[in-house]
């Protein structure tokens, strides 16, 4: 009796791309089961590419969460789009995300920026899967019009509706993506590695996430966080303490006043929420000290962008 031949192990890189705020980071966090990429309702939350590694019995997928593809204006925006486009050149397959749902008249309008993003994906001539994101927010009847609107814009290898928020159909999406990766004798990364993001960088992102969430529309996306100290001297395998000091950078005095809040209330709230998330991530107690500094037009200066890793 012959044994059934096992399918080959597959491993490779997949870029998650799409317009800003389409659900890229929510999907990555769902796949990894960890809060690796920060998520806010604001567009352009993701500024750099973030590696997240998913392991299964027959596959390892190294995802790159990327900044949203859009017609960029200003040095920071151009840098973000450049990161996303460069990533397209370095992966084995592309997952292009669009949102589920139709307009009030039942039609699907594919905007000029989305068409441009699809053209950039097509230009790379790589396996491209269309992921229809946020299916939990749209009636099932609206999925077919979305599929019809996009299927003629590129020769997609597969089209998969899913919800990164609820996890619906994410398993199917992962199975489809795995089929388009190269055969590999071994995983590309150790099975216990989750991301390439240093804990210091994640700490800065967790603080920035809370600034954006707590201040809502009052503070523009051009806020940054510079972690000046990440002291693990008191950290132990069973817990201990990490001391973190960070500076929240804004571009105007009026923004500084909003981030600090009356009597320091807003800054305390930002720090408390960020600290709670960091303690879950690091598995220990965290002392988080935050200050706010005005650095005018930092988002327009190459030296500032380089210093902040952007």
Image (cartoon, helix red, strand yellow):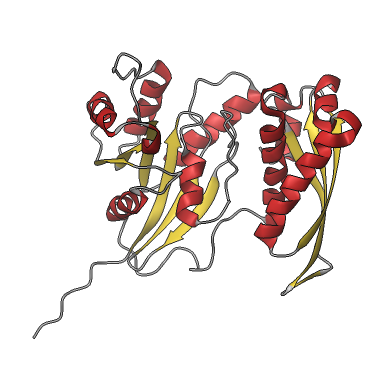
Residue 116 image point, x, y percent = 39, 22
Quarter the C terminus occupies:
top right
Q: Residue at point 39% right, 69% down?
A: 186
Q: Residue at point 44% right, 36% down?
A: 17
Q: Is residue 297 left or right of residue 294?
A: left
Q: Is residue 83 left or right of residue 301?
A: left
**Residue 45 to residue 107: above or below:** below
Query: Residue farthest to the left?
Result: 1
Query: Residue farthest to the front?
Result: 139
Query: Residue farthest to the bottom?
Result: 1
**Residue 191 to residue 2: above or below:** above
The picture quadrant where one finds residue 159 is top left
**Residue 40 to residue 4: above or below:** above
Q: Is residue 260 left or right of residue 63?
A: right
Between 63 and 83, the one lying in front of the other is: 63
Quarter the N terminus occupies:
bottom left
Query: Residue farthest to the top?
Result: 105
Residue 146 image point, x, y percent = 28, 27
Residue 122 image point, x, y percent = 32, 32
Residue 101 image point, x, y percent = 35, 27
Whether residue 133 is visible: no
């Amino acid at each position: 009796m012959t044994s059934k031949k096992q399918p080959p192990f597959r491993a490779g890189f997949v870029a998650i791309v799409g317009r800003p705020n389409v659900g890229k980071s929510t999907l990555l966090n769902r796949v990894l089961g960890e809060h690796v990429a920060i998520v806010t309702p604001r567009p352009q939350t993701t500024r750099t590419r973030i590696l997240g590694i998913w392991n299964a019995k027959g596959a390892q997928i190294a995802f790159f969460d990327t900044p949203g593809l859009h017609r960029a204006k200003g040095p920071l925006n151009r840098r973000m789009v450049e990161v996303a486009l460069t990533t397209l050149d370095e992966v084995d397959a592309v997952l292009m995300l669009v949102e589920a749902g139709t307009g009030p008249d039942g039609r699907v309008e594919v905007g000029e920026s989305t068409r441009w993003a699809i053209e950039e994906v097509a230009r790379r001539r790589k396996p491209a899967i269309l992921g229809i994101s946020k299916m939990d927010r749209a009636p099932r009847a609206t999925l077919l019009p979305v599929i019809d609107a996009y299927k003629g814009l590129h020769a997609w290898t597969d089209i998969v509706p899913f919800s990164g928020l609820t996890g619906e159909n994410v398993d199917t999406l992962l199975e489809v993506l795995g089929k388009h990766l190269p055969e590999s004798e071994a995983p590309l990364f150790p099975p216990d590695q989750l991301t390439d993001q240093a804990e210091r960088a994640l700490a800065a992102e967790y603080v920035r996430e809370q600034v954006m969430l707590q201040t809502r529309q009052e503070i523009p996306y051009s806020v940054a966080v510079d972690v000046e100290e990440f002291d693990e001297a008191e950290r132990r395998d069973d817990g201990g303490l990490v001391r973190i000091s960070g500076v929240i950078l804004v571009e105007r005095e009026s923004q500084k006043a909003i981030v600090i809040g009356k009597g320091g209330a807003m800054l305390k709230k930002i720090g408390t929420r960020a600290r709670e998330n960091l303690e879950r991530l690091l598995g220990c107690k965290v002392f988080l000290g935050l200050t706010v500094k005005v650095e005018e037009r930092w988002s327009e200066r190459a030296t500032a962008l380089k210093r902040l890793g952007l």
